[in-house]
Image: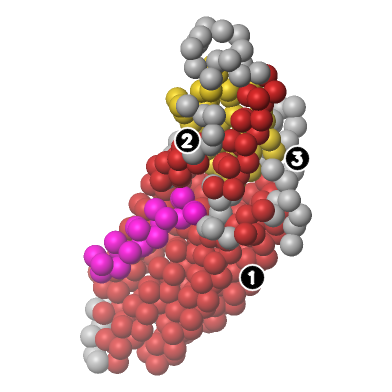
């Protein structure tokens, strides 16, 4: 259990700082990313909806607390596609005079909704399992419950693989985190199989105990997801990305120092702002060419980088007004 939880934590940390080296990064992330993300979300909604519906039928005539908890969790997981879909749609809107950075933050707000949905499913599953522990009841049709558990695992694993694959390709932390959530639901479904097996062996308390175990698993996922969404809202980036960007800038001929470098995620796109120091006797044109080269190197070194702004300062007279800024918005053709 600890080893599995550690693996989930590592994958969720990785989800906040995707670092794909795909040549597809040249594609306009606002267009291609949102289209691919929407396809993944609607597929997830359909697959998990069907999975939960099949499980609900079995819950109706079996009375299994463990399967009820798993079904509620699958329903909650399916519903997370709705706010994420809204976020992707809003993220495609062009920036305005009021929202100059666009609407990519809607995806991060959707992450908060996902955390709340996970919390609600944990409360519902825990309450049902605890009530069943206080008042044990025999599980009816344990064989069908076992089959429903297998269906739950298969459906969740299919959705998890698809969500994470698309999320990492387009750089969406929210979509990858949601895929990890679906994977955890799959293991919870396997726990339902254990509960059904216990019932077949004449252990009436197994159903309630497994239901509580599923609740604990949901709580661990909730804690990790909340931590990652908090970091994203606080503009945390992987320090390795900052190191990579700084190395790329320092390698450019004419740049003597990189006193300031900032990266931030807005939705599933990165934005960079850097200050570089060059020789004070350079002409304005030469300083501009260095800034252009710096921007070019950044966009090719950092995956999912949408914009880069480079400020050029002279090396000797820090109070001088000689200051060049190049702002570039990278655009590419969608697949």
* Alpha carbons under labels 1 and 2: distance apart: 44 Å
Of the two numbered discs 2 and 3 on the same chain, state the one appearing first in sequence: 3
Residue shown at the point (26%, 79%) measured from the top left: 206
Question: For numbered disc 3, what is the local secondary structure?
Answer: loop
Q: Are marks 1 and 2 in contact (CB under 8 Å)?
A: no
State the residue position of label 2: 250
Could you tell whether 76 is left or right of 307 in the image? left
Residue 135 in percent (x, y) is at 27, 72
Dot 2 crowding, Cα within 10 Å, few <14, some 14–19, many 20+: some
State the residue position of label 1: 43
Dot 1 crowding, Cα within 10 Å, few <14, some 14–19, many 20+: some
**Relative to 129, does residue 230 appear above or below in the rendering?**
above
Could you tell whether 313 is left or right of 99 in the image? left
Residue shown at the point (59%, 48%) measured from the top left: 300
Residue shown at the point (30%, 74%) measured from the top left: 210
* Alpha carbons under labels 2 and 3: distance apart: 33 Å
Question: For numbered disc 1, what is the local secondary structure?
Answer: helix
Bounds of the magenta segment: 1-19
State the residue position of label 3: 94
Q: Is residue 222 visible?
A: no
């Amino acid at each position: 259990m600890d080893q599995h939880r550690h693996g989930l934590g590592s994958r969720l940390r990785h989800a906040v700082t995707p670092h794909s080296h795909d040549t597809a990064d040249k594609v306009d992330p606002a267009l291609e990313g949102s289209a691919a993300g929407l396809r993944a979300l609607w597929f997830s909604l359909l697959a998990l909806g069907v999975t939960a519906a099949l499980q609900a039928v079995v819950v109706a005539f079996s009375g299994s607390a463990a399967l009820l908890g798993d079904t509620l969790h699958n329903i909650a997981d399916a519903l997370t596609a709705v706010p994420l879909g809204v976020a992707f749609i809003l993220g495609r809107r062009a920036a305005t005079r009021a929202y100059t950075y666009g609407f990519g933050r809607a995806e991060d707000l959707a992450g908060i909704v996902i955390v709340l949905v996970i919390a609600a499913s944990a409360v519902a599953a825990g309450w049902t399992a605890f009530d069943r522990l206080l008042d044990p009841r025999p599980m009816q049709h344990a064989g069908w419950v076992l089959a429903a558990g297998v269906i739950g695992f298969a459906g969740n694993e299919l959705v998890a693989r698809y969500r994470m694959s698309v999320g990492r390709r387009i750089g969406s932390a929210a979509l990858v985190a949601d895929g990890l959530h679906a994977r955890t639901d799959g293991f919870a479904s396997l726990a339902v199989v254990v509960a059904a097996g216990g019932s077949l062996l004449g252990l009436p308390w197994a159903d309630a105990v497994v239901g509580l175990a599923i609740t604990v698993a949901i709580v661990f996922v909730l804690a990790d997801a909340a931590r990652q969404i908090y970091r994203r809202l606080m503009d945390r980036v992987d320090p390795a990305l900052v190191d990579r960007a700084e190395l790329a800038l320092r390698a450019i001929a004419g740049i003597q120092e990189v006193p300031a470098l900032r990266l931030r995620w807005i939705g599933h796109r990165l934005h960079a702002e850097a200050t570089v120091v060059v020789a004070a006797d350079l002409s304005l044109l030469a300083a501009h060419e260095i800034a252009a080269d710096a921007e070019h190197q950044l966009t090719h070194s950092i995956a999912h980088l949408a914009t880069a702004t480079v400020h050029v300062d002279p090396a000797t007279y820090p109070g001088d007004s000689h200051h060049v800024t190049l702002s570039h918005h990278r655009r590419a053709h969608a697949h």
